[in-house]
Amino acid sequence: MNAVALREDGADFASLIVRSRANVARSRWLCARARTVVARSVRLCPTPIVGGSDLADPEANGSSSTSDGRPHSGATAPTRRSVLVLATDPVMRAFVADAMTAHHDVIEASEVQDGLETIASGVRVDVVVAGCFMLGEARGLAPCATVARALYDGCPWIPVVVIADTPPPTLKADVLLTGVRTFLPKDFTPAELVTTISLTARRPDAPVPAAGRVAAIKEIFAVLEQAITDVPALAVLAAMVAMSRSHFSRTFHAVAGISLRDYVRDMRLKRAQELMRASRLSLSAIALEAGFYDLPHFNKAFRHRFGMSPTQFRLASLSSHAAPAT
């Protein structure tokens, strides 16, 4: 009897374990389903999400910040970013949004102007994800540069991630001096997108540059454009906008999204690639015209930025320009 009872008890115990595991699996499924429903509800809400969810009520979650937006020591810095998804195709826009809702707050826009108006309304945006391969032409990627420039003209401090086919060198050149920081292929995975956003987006506790500082740095943009071969010293540029050198450097980086040194480099590379595509000047002449010290310096900077030599770029540009339209 004891052996029989033990076997029965063992069978009951095994059955209990099986039912428990089934209940756990069911619970996990229900939780995942609930997260999906909540994420879709947030996306369909007509009121855009203002800032990251962790920033919505700093007193409610026990965090606080200093006057410049940095958290006080001891406060837990938020990790969720506010992501603006810009794509005309509603299916791709929904796919991109769904891939991020578990990690970040998502705002959707179908047109560039809608996105800019959303930002202008005061909604915080830490990064823009643009599906440029769907913005206009079926095969060409020319709309990509237009989108990037429009976003940079309005909000230069916001980085941009472009989803597109492998970008040609000419497109990489066209998006110089914009907020484009990286490209993702159309067949990206949600994990790749989330990782890219984490590496590219502004810190969720980073303050949005004040309008006066943005205007001041845009004045410097114009000065640099006119002095590409003889850029004024840092102290001179800082004095133009009544700032100390250290304050100017920090402000420039906050507004432009890159340092002054990198901005000047990209400005010169942009001029160089324009000359390579529009003239028959030698590379040595182009290097000097664009403000580089000499051809070796130009070659090194160009290869580092584009992954190819100026000669290879010029050949690729000529090939793409001569290719028949389809």
Image (cartoon, grey):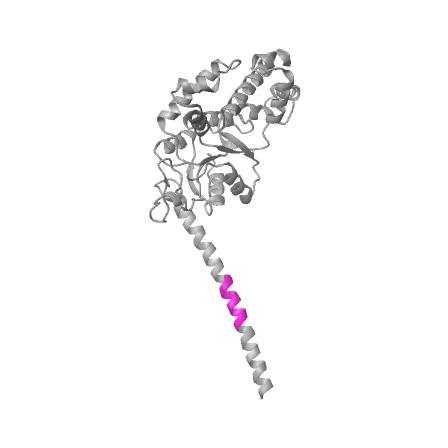
The C terminus sits in image quarter = top right
**Magenta-highlighted stretch: main secondary structure?**
helix
Q: Does the magenta stretch include residue 23?
A: yes
Camera-nearest residue between 116 and 76: 76
Q: In this view, does 252 lie above or below 54?
A: above
At 49% from the left and 24% from the top, the residue drawn is 260
At 58% from the left and 87% from the top, the residue drawn is 2
Give the image location of residue 270, x and y in percent: 54, 20
The N terminus sits in image quarter = bottom right
- Res. 314 in view: no
- Res. 250 in view: yes
Q: Is residue 195 magenta?
A: no
Q: Name the quadrant containing residue 249.
A: top left
Give the image location of residue 323, x and y in percent: 62, 21
Give the image location of residue 191, x and y in percent: 54, 45
Camera-nearest residue between 21 and 89: 21
Q: In this view, does 225 lie above or below 36?
A: above
Q: The magenta stretch spans which residues?
A: 16-25
At 59% from the left and 81% from the top, the residue drawn is 7
